[in-house]
Image: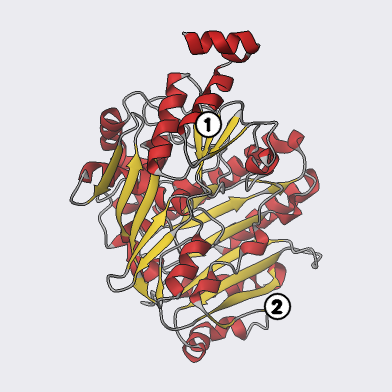
Amino acid sequence: MKEQGDETSRGHAASNPLDILVQELKSTLEYSKVLTPDSEGYSDSIKRWSDSVEKKAGIVAYVNSAQEIARTILLCRKHSVSFVVAGGKHSSSGASSTDGGLVIDLAKMRKVEIKASRKIAKVQGGCVWQDVDEAAAEHGLAMVGGTVNHTGVGGLTLGGGYGWLSGRYGLTIDSLLQVEIVLGDGSIKTASKDENSDLFWAVRGAGHCFGVVSEFVFETHDQKNHVWAGQMLWPASTKLDAVLDFANDLMTKSDPDSAIILGVTKPPFMAEPAVVATVFHNGSRDNAERVFQPLLDLQPLKNTTQERPYREMNGVMNHAVGYGGRKLSKGACFVPRLSAAFVRSLIVDLQTLHRAVPGSQRSILLFEFLHSGGWTKIANDATAFANRGPQLNVMIGPFWDNAEDDQKIQLWARQIAKKTKMELERRKKEEGSPAWMERIGEYGNYDGLLSNASGIFGDNLDRLRSLKMRYDPENVFDKSHALLTAAKE
């Protein structure tokens, strides 16, 4: 009581939980940096990948350890101050931003330790994939990381994680061996297949809902050779069918080392939409060109393919999805063969958006043709991630300029996702509605609009809810997919 009285004598601080929290954080967090709106560096601290989810945090705490994360959580709960967790800040859902609350920012926790003899990577929770790619490459190793290297390791991993090596090694979570995680009661747990195995099950697909992962331990994979990769571009009006035929055909071959992500967008140097192929082959140029010769024969207007170190691969698409500006991601699924007529209809929808919303010309639709054998060899209930199957991902990525168009963009993204789902339903009927197609949901990491949890976790949702009641019964981690109650805005 004396401390509160002293503060009252200095002004209004004692009546403001945020002011008291700031004082207690600064006195108890030995190595952390605590920012408030009047602090130098505050403006940069609240920036996000998408400007549309930038919010005015009351406090930003740059923590340095699991212990400091735990203390911060407990102090927030003591003073009833809402908090969020920020890693790579690459989400467009707003789950790492807060209006007036506290951000636990992991940006100072970016150490990567490679144990080359065991092919193990210990990765702190604030790392981005570029940190991991570069550290692993020094030892001739690689990880199944994201296809954009400024994505946070934590966000991608906890939601599943697809990458260029997924065809051979599966999802990012399939190479995850262990986590150190801070729970809502401040306890620090190790979770692996041998310790707290049920929590480890939940973390692999729904980790955002259970705690703050301060350290990941991954299995790495030999990657001594260069890869052949780059981008090729053609006018969609004349080349879409041929490029799409190639991508569909590639999925029929038993080649886990070749992949292609097709993008439909309107480059600034073209008067019409283009189809952009980001291609990847984990092997020599000679082998790659034999695989991709049909695309090369289509005489692309742009061709950046070459042999390059794998560490560069996850930066090939960075230029299209850099930080800043208003943008959104929304997910859907498709099953090859993907129909050219359907994609052409989406191009019409994209052109309609261009005319209606300023700044939307940068918008892009991505179709990920990655070999599914790497992740389908693992049972759908082996981890919380519930969307294992031959289906592939669509990423709906609108860009726009003005806040007054936020709702219009969200509606458009939902409409495109609904249209894609209708196409999937058509394909189900065409295939005779096999059981695996009935289980197709949505990839949570692309779900910038936070869809219903059942669409993300499917048959695994009941077990997740039971584990949520065990490990986070008070729903401390409530900013992501709702397992107990509706997620908070």
Q: Give percent across and percent down for residue 389.
A: 35, 57
Task: Please state which of the two labelled residues, at mark 2 or mark 1, is closer to the viewer.
Answer: 1
Residue 198 seen from this side = yes
The residue singled out by tag 1 in the image is 26
User: Could you tell me how far apart the alpha carbons at marks 2 and 1 are, in whole angstroms?
Assistant: 53 Å
Tell me if residue 305 comes above or below residue 367 in the rendering: below
Left or right placement of residue 113 versus residue 109 in this view = left
Mark nearer the N terminus (2 vs 1): 1
The image's mark for residue 77 is none
Choose between 209 and 302: the one closer to the eye.
209
Question: Residue at horizontal 49%, vertical 29%?
Answer: 27
The reply to whether residue 439 is visible in this rendering is no
Q: Position of residue 200 (x, y in %)?
A: 27, 46
Can you give x and y, in whole percent of width and height, for residue 64 in the image? Answer: 46, 45
Answer with the quarter of the image where residue 137 lies: bottom left
Report which residue position mark 2 lands on.
Answer: 302
Determine whether the residue tagged by mark 2 lies in a helix, strand or loop: strand
Kindly indicate the quadrant of the structure image that contains residue 257: bottom left
The residue shown at (57%, 22%) is 18
Counting from the top left corner in percent of width and height, residue 180 is at 32, 47
* Vertical order, 364 against 187 (above or below): below
Say if 63 sits above or below 251 in the image. above
Tell me which amino acid carries mark 1. Answer: Lys
Question: In which quadrant of the rendered image does the C terminus lie?
Answer: top right
Q: Callout 2: few (<14), some (14-19), or many (20+) C-alpha neighbours within 10 Å?
A: few
Most extreme residue toward the left, as rendered? 194
Whether residue 18 sits left or right of residue 44 in the image: it is left
Where disc 1 sits, the SS reads: helix
Q: Amino acid at mark 2?
A: Lys
